[in-house]
């Protein structure tokens, strides 16, 4: 089973990495860029399991390691 | 207009970051993790533009700054 975890900075949190990306793009002439925010995506291959159980485990993985829930939101997508 | 750019290591390229994530998850007891690969996601807000033109510009942004096309693949998704 494959799972995709998307981790983004919370909307209320400053994102200096995203600001740097937006600034660099404008500097290169992409003046249409109003803002940018950067997050990460983690693709996991899991040993076959019940989707509900896998989702619960993935939720724990996010809270224990993958995401910093003080400043980041995460989203879990399962693929068969 | 909002655009989401997803950048992943190419399948043929070693991904030490992803390997570290997989190792750390197993170390925490998540033994079902077979492998992990880590990429990034960049959400851009663009001044309103023609979707086709925006997609062409985003393709240039990826090739010039956002992705290292030697080792990374990118995917562009436009949201209205």
Image (cartoon, coloured by chain):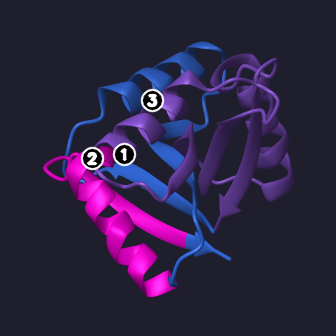
Chain colours: A blue, B purple
Work out whether A2 lies above or below B57.
Answer: below
Work out whether B14 lies above or below B19.
Answer: above
Q: Residue A67, image x and y in percent?
A: 29, 48
Q: Residues within 10 Å of mark 3 (few under 14, many from 20)?
A: some
Is there CB contact under 8 Å for labels 1 and 3? no
| Horizontal relation, residue B14 to residue A20: left or right | right
Residue A79 shows in this picture: yes
Is there CB contact under 8 Å for labels 2 and 1? yes
Give the residues in magenta. A51-77
Q: Residue at x 74, y 18 (%)?
A: B64
| Horizontal relation, residue A49 to residue B5: left or right | left
| Horizontal relation, residue B37 to residue B60: left or right | left
- Which structural element holds mark 1? helix
Does the magenta segment cover residue A56?
yes
| Front label number (2 vs 3) | 2
Q: Residue A74, image x and y in percent?
A: 35, 59
Q: Which residue is mark 2?
A: B28
Chain at tag 3: B
């Amino acid at each position: 089973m494959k799972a995709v975890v998307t981790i983004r900075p919370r909307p209320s949190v400053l994102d200096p990495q995203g600001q740097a990306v937006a600034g660099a793009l404008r500097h290169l002439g992409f003046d249409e860029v109003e803002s940018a925010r950067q997050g990460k995506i983690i693709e996991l291959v899991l040993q076959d399991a019940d989707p509900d159980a896998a989702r619960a485990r993935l939720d724990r993985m996010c809270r224990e390691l993958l995401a910093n829930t003080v400043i980041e939101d995460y989203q879990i997508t399962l693929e068969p």
